[in-house]
Image: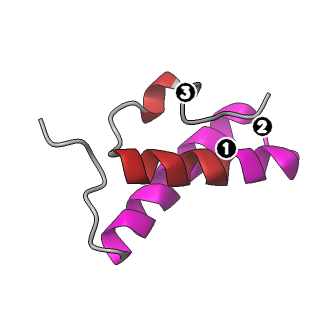
Amino acid sequence: MPWSADDYPASMRHLSTQARLKAIEIANALLEEGLEEGMAIRIAIAKAKEWAARHGLPPRDEE
């Protein structure tokens, strides 16, 4: 089942909104390619953090 802005893995909740949306996009693409769910989530979070850093965005929510 693809994830959305309202329904995403709990491990993505600490990401900033922009990074979370990118992680969801990446994870859904990886799932479509046949990657296992857990691996797709881990890769997507790492890549979304890299993406946020490259774009000068916070990777995590400010607490």
The answer to whether the residue labelled 1 contacts the one labelled 2, judged by CB atoms less than 8 Å apart, is yes
- Residue type pointed to by label 2: Glu
Counting other residues with Cα less than 10 Å from the Cα at mark 3, is it few (<14), some (14-19), or many (20 or more)? few
Counting other residues with Cα less than 10 Å from the Cα at mark 1, is it few (<14), some (14-19), or many (20 or more)? many
Can you give x and y, in whole percent of width and height, for residue 52 in the image? Answer: 37, 64
Can you give x and y, in whole percent of width and height, for residue 3 in the image? Answer: 67, 33
Mark before the other along the chain sequence, 1 or 3: 3
Q: Secondary structure at mark 3?
A: loop
View extreme (left): residue = 63
Residue 51 vertical placement versus 18 (above, below): below
Gap between marks 1 and 3 measured at Cα: 18 Å
Mark before the other along the chain sequence, 2 or 3: 3
Q: Residue at x 36, y 76 (%)?
A: 54
Quadrant of the drawing holding the N terminus? top right
Q: Is residue 32 magenta?
A: yes
Looking at the rendering, the stretch of residues picked out in magenta corresponds to 28-54
Quadrant of the drawing holding the C terminus? top left
- Residue type pointed to by label 3: Asp
